[in-house]
Amino acid sequence: MLVNGGPGAFHEAWRRTFAQDCAQLGLIEGRDFTVEPRFAEGQLGRLPELATEHVRQGVDVIVALGGPAANAARRATPTIPVIFAIVTDPVALGLAETAQRPGRNATGITSLDPRQAEAQMRLLKDVFPGMERVAALSDQTIPGADASGLAPIDRANKAAAEALGLRPQIVKLPAPTAAAPDPDFDAAFAAMVRDSAQAVVVFDTPLNFSHGKRLADLAVTHRLPTMFAGGMSAVGGLITYGTSVADTWRRLPAFIDRIFKGTPPGEIPVEFITRRELIFNLKVAQSIGVTIPPELLARADQVIR
């Protein structure tokens, strides 16, 4: 396993689920396979070295969580199968020739939803009809930035906000370094407050995903409503909405099983997760002094009280 982030309670919970899902396919950890995790802990520049460690170990499969991890694994080996998750667009990233027939040594699952930015911004307007300014928390590790420094996810959210008459503010966290391993989240929120942001959409980028709880706590401190992507309700944001990375993880054992049985990864189509989940956290709503309209609570998959 090659992971953008670090170990912790979230990862351990996933590992337990992963082992259970593998067992349902007859793959027992410790008997049929072992897991060798490598964590970049947000320092994405370490990923090539960690991927090379896996290759030297002679692993049979690399499970890469996150686009940067998947890219590092693909560059480290043209032969060892790579199964990716938490990747927005595997074709654009060069991980697959096409979604139907990846054609190389990588395949996997993506929760890419081309309508997610539009759906999230529209939901924010439904919750806060008078909202005019919205911040979007991104980071500089995302590939595909244009001349203005905006990656595809940044551009999609900027366009979606402007289409609804909102003024968007894209805040980009700098990539961690050995000298500064922790992003300056305080500076990011200070920038949002200076721009009079009325809510913040937290992208499911590598840095945000690794520090979700800290981001949610800072937002409460600044009394800023937050919207996190699907699968991140545990961090304590006001709203969780969109496709869930957790749904992608549950499919990983099926990919591993097919590869162990001899199917080349280039012949296994990329799977797309399209189910969106909607969760409201009324504890957070109360702490920051906002009210969620009852008709929206009725639409939710879950309400945390």
Image (spheres, rainbow, N blue to C red):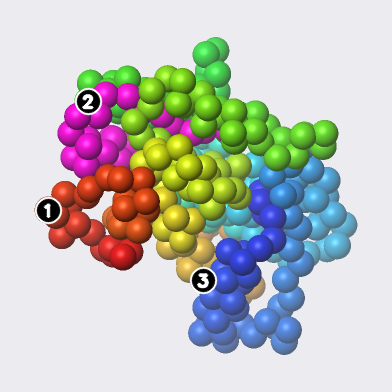
Residue 295 has which mark? Answer: 1
Disc 3 marks a residue whose amino acid type is Ala
Classed neighbour count for the residue bearing mark 3: other residues with Cα under 10 Å, few (<14), some (14–19), many (≥20): some
Mark closer to the observer (3, 1): 1
Classed neighbour count for the residue bearing mark 1: other residues with Cα under 10 Å, few (<14), some (14–19), many (≥20): few
Q: CA distance from mark 1 to mark 2?
A: 21 Å
Residue 254 has which mark? Answer: 3
Q: CA distance from mark 3 to mark 1?
A: 38 Å
Q: Which mark is first along the chain, 1 or 3? A: 3
Mark closer to the observer (1, 2): 1
Residue 227 x/y as whole percent? 37, 44
Contact flag, marks 2 and 3 (Cβ < 8 Å): no
Disc 1 marks a residue whose amino acid type is Glu
Residue 192 x/y as whole percent? 46, 26
Q: State which quadrant residue 122 falls in.
A: top left
Q: Which mark is first along the chain, 2 or 1? A: 2
User: Residue 126: within the magenta?
Assistant: yes
User: Compared with residue 154, is residue 21 higher up or lower down, i.e. above or below?
Assistant: below
For label 2, the residue is 164
| Magenta highlight range | 115-139
Can residue 18 be seen at all in this image of the molecule? no
- The residue lying at 51 percent from left, 31 percent from top is 189
Can residue 10 be seen at all in this image of the molecule? yes
* Secondary structure of residue under mark 1: helix
- The residue lying at 46 percent from left, 61 percent from top is 234
Mark closer to the observer (2, 3): 2
249 vs 52, nearest the viewer: 249
169 vs 104, nearest the viewer: 169
